Image (cartoon, helix red, strand yellow):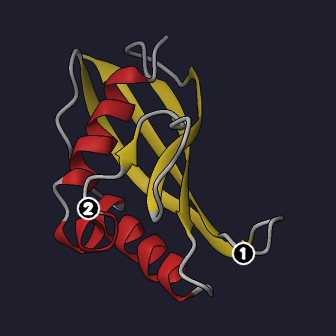
Amino acid sequence: MSDKPLIDAVVASLKAAPAVTAIVAQRIHASPPRLPTYPCVVVTRAEGRPAGENDAIEHLLTLTCASRFGGPEEARALVAAVRAALHDARPALSGRRLVNLRVPYADVFAGADRETALGIVRVRAVTELL
């Protein structure tokens, strides 16, 4: 069970979303970069589990939106743009069919270093074999 097709589709969708790229350009990563440039969006967690028939999989992704703007405003705008780009989106997946994609949760908070504002966007998707 692999989350890679969904992660690739989510990253591609965000890179194609003008409201997201206006803030982060193309700094949208499927895995954490060693030395990130801010602001950026990173897929920081992926979980998948069986969900019913047709080899369905329920995927839970956590996207982290990070900003060093000097306050929470940029992180809030980025979270809103990511949420709008993904909620009910229908990106094409390789080898699977997307049943649904939702953004059930988002939050913005100060990072432990007090320099970084972080946003969390949780994505829930269900996919089936073609």
For this orientation, the residue located farthest to the right is 112
Mark drawn on residue 25: 2
Q: Is residue 86 above or below residue 20?
A: above
The amino acid type, in three-letter code, at marker 1 is: Phe
Of residue 69 and residue 128, the one placed in the foreground of this image is: 69
Task: Pick the quarter of the image with the C terminus.
Answer: top left
In the rendered view, would you say 55 is above or below 20? above
Q: Residue at x 32, y 43 (%)?
A: 10
Q: Is residue 87 left or right of residue 62?
A: left
- In the depicted structure, whether residue 24 falls above or below residue 96: below
Residue pictured at 38% horizontal, 33% vertical: 7
Give the crowd class for mark 2: few <14, some 14-19, many >=20 residues within 10 Å: some
Name the one closer to the observer, 3 or 97. 3
Q: Name the residue that disc number 1 marks.
A: 109
Left or right of 29 in this view: 90:
left
- Residue 25, x across and y down, in percent: 26, 61
**Residue 50, position in %: x, y?**
56, 19
- Looking at the rendered structure, the kind of residue marked 2 is Ala
Image coords of residue 58 (percent x, y) = 52, 31
Q: Which mark is residue 31?
A: none
Q: Nearer the viewer, mark 2 or mark 1?
A: 2
Dividing the picture into quadrants, the one containing residue 117 is: bottom right
Which percent across, then down, holds residue 128?
A: 34, 22
Residue at the image point whose x is 20% and y is 43% from the top: 91
- Residue 28 is left or right of residue 39, and the answer is left
